[in-house]
Amino acid sequence: MSRSGLAGNTCCSSKTLLMCNEQNPPGVSHDDHIVLFDGVCKLCSFWARFLIRHDREQRYKLATVQSEEGKAILSWAALPTSYYDTLVYVHGGKFYVRSTAVIKIVAGLPFPWRFAVIAWLIPKPLRDWIYDRIAQNRYSIFGKYDRCVLPEPDHMKRFLNAK
């Protein structure tokens, strides 16, 4: 059986960029662009605020991996729910992790951020190696909050659980 639990699913790959699935994660439509991030990580929270500020089309919805919505999506993607070592981007029944997730997200931002897609030219093993070094040391380098930081009131609608 494949990583997604679907026998014979040839889109799935171990530990890396994407998974194809016949269904969307719980509470997510096929057209949603979901970004999961570690809500206690100061670097990850900065990234979420960066997305809110620069995503003028409000394409991306955010969720922390610690939230119920985030955990449900992690379970759907067969990713760990007890520790978090990657950003996750979900769109169209697929999920992307590590450097691929970052590049795909930045590709959806307006000028000048869109030019960061030039990172596709860097071989994936090197991109992911760099990503992993930052992810493994993010708390010691950038710090950690005691608990998930609540979004500012005007940012609430950008989160997956917003009503």
Image (spheres, rainbow, N blue to C red):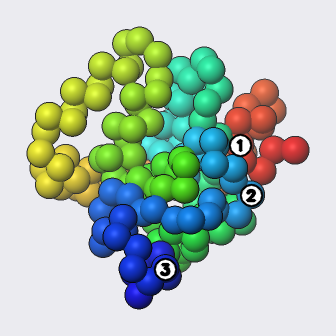
Q: Earlier in the sequence, mark 3 or mark 1?
A: 3
Q: Amino acid at mark 2?
A: Gly
Classify 10 Å Cα crowding around label 3: few (below 14), some (14-19), many (20 and above). few
Residue tagged 2: 27
- Tell me where residue 81 sits by quadrant: bottom right
30, 120: nearer the viewer = 30
Which of the 4 quarters of the picture holds residue 123?
A: top left
Q: CA distance from mark 2 to mark 3?
A: 20 Å
Q: Which mark is residue 159?
A: 1
Q: Residue at x 51, y 28 (%)?
A: 50
SS of the residue under disc 2: loop
Q: Which residue is mark 3?
A: 6
Does 52 appear above or below 39? above
First reached walking from the N terminus: tag 1 or tag 2: 2
Say which of marks 1 and 2 sits in front: 2
Q: Quadrant of the C terminus?
A: top right
Q: Position of residue 55 (x, y in %)?
A: 56, 23
